[in-house]
Amino acid sequence: MKIRFAFTTAMALISILLFSCEAEPVANYKIQVLCTAGTQTEASFWGTYTIDGKIKNMKTEKFGTNSYVFESEVSAEDIIEISATKDSATSDLQIKIYKDGDRVKEAYLDAYKTISDNYVYTLRLEYIVPTEDDSEE
C-alpha cells in the first residue's frame, strides 16, 4: 500500500513538473520578399533568412511581368532575420513579415542613390518575437 501511494504521488509530481516546464509556444509567421523593376531581369534578387539561429537560402520565383518574389511560412520562438540583395540599382526591394494575416514588420529599399552617390543593394530586417510578458503590457 505504501509503495502504491509513493508511486501515485511521484507520478503526480512528475506530471506537474512536465506541465510547468513546457517550451515557449511557437508562433507562425509568413515572410514575403518582393523585388520589382522596369524589366524582369532587373528585378532579380537573392537572400537568406534565419529563424531562431537556423539559416536558409531564399528560392525566388517570377511574379507577374516585372517582379520576383520569395514567400515562406515559418514558425519562430525568438527571432526572424532576413537579408535580401537586389541585382540591379534600378529595382525596388521590400520585406514584410505577417502574423495571422496582419503585417507586423516591414522594410523598403527604393531605387535610389545615397548621399555619397553609392547605390544601396542590400536590405535587412530583424523581428524579435514578442513574449507573453510583452503582450500583457
Image (cartoon, rainbow, N blue to C red):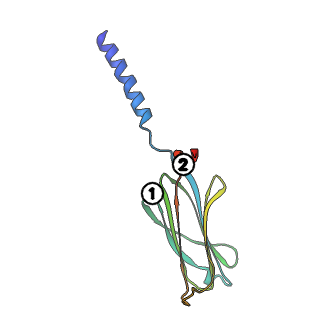
Residue 44 screen position, x and y as percent: 58, 79
Q: Amino acid at mark 1?
A: Asp
Circle 1 residues within 10 Å: few <14, some 14–19, many ≥20: some
Q: On the image, which quarter does residue 94 sit in?
A: bottom right
Residue ID at (34%, 14%): 5
Q: Amino acid at mark 2?
A: Asp
Q: Is residue 21 left or right of residue 104?
A: left
Residue ID at (52%, 45%): 133
Q: Can the viewer see residue 87?
A: yes
Residue 21, placed above or below residue 53: above
Residue ID at (66%, 56%): 102
Circle 2 residues within 10 Å: few <14, some 14–19, many ≥20: few
Q: Nearer the viewer, mark 1 or mark 2?
A: 2
Q: Can the viewer see residue 95?
A: no
| Residue furthest to the bottom | 117
The tag on residue 32 is none
According to the image, label 2 marks what residue? Answer: 134
| Residue furthest to the front | 137
According to the image, label 1 marks what residue? Answer: 52
Q: On the image, which quarter does residue 95 sit in?
A: bottom right
Image quadrant occupied by the N terminus: top left
Label 2: which secondary element: helix
Distance, label 1 to label 2, CA atoms, is 18 Å
Residue 22 screen position, x and y as percent: 44, 39
Label 1: which secondary element: loop
Q: Is residue 72 left or right of residue 101?
A: left
Residue 74 screen position, x and y as percent: 54, 56
Q: Are marks 1 and 2 in contact (CB under 8 Å)?
A: no
| Residue furthest to the left | 3
